Image: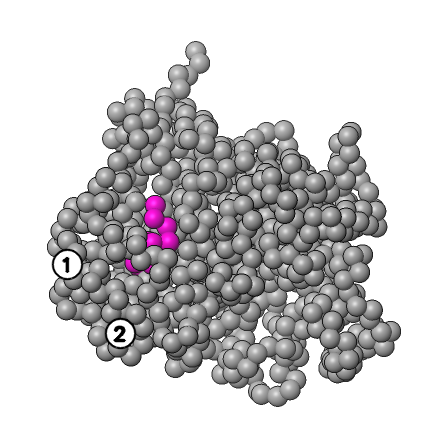
Amino acid sequence: MGTWNKTGCVLCAQNCGLEVLVEDNRMVKARPDKDNPRSQGYACRKGLNVLYHQYPEDRLSKPLKRTEKGFVAVSWEEAIGEIADKLRALIDRHGPRSLAYMGGSSQGGHFEASFGLGLLRALGSQYYYSSAGQEFSGIWWLFGRMLGRQYHVAIPDEHASKMLVGWGWNGMESHQMPRARKTLTDFSKSPDRTLVIIDPRKSETAEIADIHLPVRPGTDALLAKAMIATIVQEGWENREYLEQYVAGWDKLVPWFNVFDVQEALAVCGLDPAQVKEVCRLMTTRTWCMHPDLGVYMGRNSTLNTYFINLLGVVCGIFCVSGGNVIPGMVMPMGFHADERSPKTWRTVTTRMPPAAAGSFPPNVLPEEILSDHPERIRAVLVSACNPLRSYADTKAYEKAFSALDLLIVNEIVMSETARFAHYVLPCRSYYESWDGTFFPWTFPEVYFQMRRPIVSPPGDCLEASQIFTRLADRLGLIPGIPENLFQAAAGNRLAFGMALMQWAGAAPEALQRMPFVLAQTLGRQWDSAALAALWGLLMTAPQGFRKNAERAGFAAGTDLGDRMFQAILDHPEGLWVGKASIEDNWSAIRTPSGKIEVAIPELEAAGSALNGKSETDALKMPADFPFILNAGRHMDRNMNTLMRNPDWNKGKKDCTIAISPGDAARLGLSDGDPARVETEAGSATGEIEVSHRVREGMVLIPHGFGLLYGETVHGLNVNELTKNTHRDFLGTPIHRFVPCRVEKIQRRK
């Protein structure tokens, strides 16, 4: 007889609540958890198939060391000792800039990032790479300039809104908001609400929208500028909001006063009357926006986001109910790293800043490794990600990782990246460990769930947080902990906290290494460095978090953090741990003026010059690559690299090359035909899918395929078609606008 366990999905940032049936220490079935306060019984087919993530082939159970004869199993003591010695030797010889950490990227658990970053900083390096830098450098950097903190990403307050504008976002497939399909369907069906989708193609979300603006690929910035110009020229801007809450708008007004809207919209391929109607709705209704990778990773990238943000500013939607708001957080997603500060590093070869809340863009890492710079990166710690399938230009990554002096990979499987490692360290899965995420996707409520182990790990697997703690200990980075603290850790938590603070007050270095100290004390008692870190996080939570907790019903007091910790343990389904206040939203602005600052010098030249004429010339496709590849199609049949066993999609077409019926006819292609796609980076072959959802001139290929499973590679790896140098000035890859060609392959007779 099995037991149902409350937990959460680890396959996307929504982390919907799940109940999992466990029999004989094995997960056998998953279903939605109706008690989860955020997802309320909602889950997609990815979460319901999470067993395919938990039980892949090539599961690791012992530390592995690469030798001339291949990988061999070694003890933890041997692996940690050798890695620590090699790290120390490299840093002593080449300096701390020779080390990078690539992690904090998981959709299922964020606690390893605290320990990975703690180890990186303790060794003197700032080179932290994550998927945030891959996808969100532009938007996070912009919010850093406009709102004062890079991690203050203003989310849509859709539940209080009358109109939702999705831009470059296919929420019906990619989610990116809680209970996305239900929320979008409700908007679509409600007579009092409006769903607007701006997307080149007739996506699943565009198909249910009240208004679909099928913008020409690559013209999102031009469209946004034209919409702002329409509003300014009609006198529809929210002048009271601009005067009270915005700084620098007067410098930008000349960009729009005489802008040729008609010329721009002709280039965008849109009906001026329909665009003007959307602008009218934006200036007369409460609305919020949800941009996504279609603009973040589209042509013009950061400039797209800048003009879309400016559109929101002139309509007055930021920091107001029903608009885009700064959410409450358990912990910020990263930290503010303004590259204008002399203390903030840039990469030594590409001179790239850490634009995504302290994270550098993975696109530049191959160049930073392969450079001849004396301070080039020579050692990389990879945890909770698979860069050889997740990031642009697989060939560049293979060459770079082959050139490293030391590559350490924390993983649950022998992934494509792990195969290049010098040491592969076996991790517990997210259902064998304590872990949680800090995605701030709700407002005003603040949600948190700490998933607990529901099955035991195989062999000698550890939490990634425990692995980093062992490395820190072997490197001598953890101060000597007195015996009384080890003893106190076995007793009352508050008594332990008092003893800890007394010691730390006399040992300042302990505060800098606190996650490791907690892991060595409470973490040993609980067999979880992550759980110990959670307790420490809650005990030292800032005043803003405590105010939110009190609004959610937690009584004030010095023991608030410990009571919240116990409440989280008592609610495996997750709970509301805070409630933000819309009145406090403006207090979160951290710019020098205390207002939204819209004049950004780095974007002035490109922003002022953008117009229909300049874009007409720039949008001409090269003759040898006439199509536009969207490298990263979102579907409910792809899941990054977390679902390796293709059987989870058995009977379904998952990795296809999707083109329009018109293009298929011109190329002599039919549904199911084999075809080759070629770009500047390389070529790949796959099966054609003819779809009415695809716009003519576009090619759609999903990400997360080309995985080696057993002895078979399933699907094509779209990152063999992308160049890491095809990026914007902050390093964001232009994955949604890759020039390509498509060729028919003759079937063998």
Above or below — where is 428 with respect to 654?
below
Question: Magenta segment, which residues?
Answer: 299-308
Residue 386: give x, y in percent of width and height: 59, 44
Measure the C-alpha gap from mark 1 to mark 2.
Answer: 20 Å
- Give the x, y percent position of residue 564: 61, 78
Amino acid residing under circle 2: Leu
| Residue in the image at 60% along x and 39% along y | 372
The mark lying in front, picked from 1 and 2, is: 1
Please say whether residue 429 is visible from this viewpoint.
no
Q: How crowded is the residue under tag 2: few (<14 C-alpha within 10 Å), some, or many (20+)?
A: some
The one of 668 and 420 positioned closer to us in this rendering: 420
Q: Is residue 550 visible?
A: yes
Residue 469 to residue 67: above or below? below
**Residue 306 in magenta?**
yes
In the rendered view, how is the structure colored?
A: one colour
- Can you say which quadrant of the picture contains the N terminus? bottom right
In the image, taking residue 627 as reference, residue 148 lies left or right, namely right
Callout 1: helix, strand or loop? Answer: loop
Amino acid type indicated by mark 1: Val
Disc sitting over residue 242 in the figure:
2
Q: Residue 258 carries which label?
A: 1
Q: Which residue is drawn at 73% across and 65% down?
A: 516
- Left-right relation of 698 to 105: left
- Please state the horizontal and vertical placement of residue 358, each as a whole percent of the image: 54, 60
Give the answer, above or below, for where 712 lies relative to 515. above
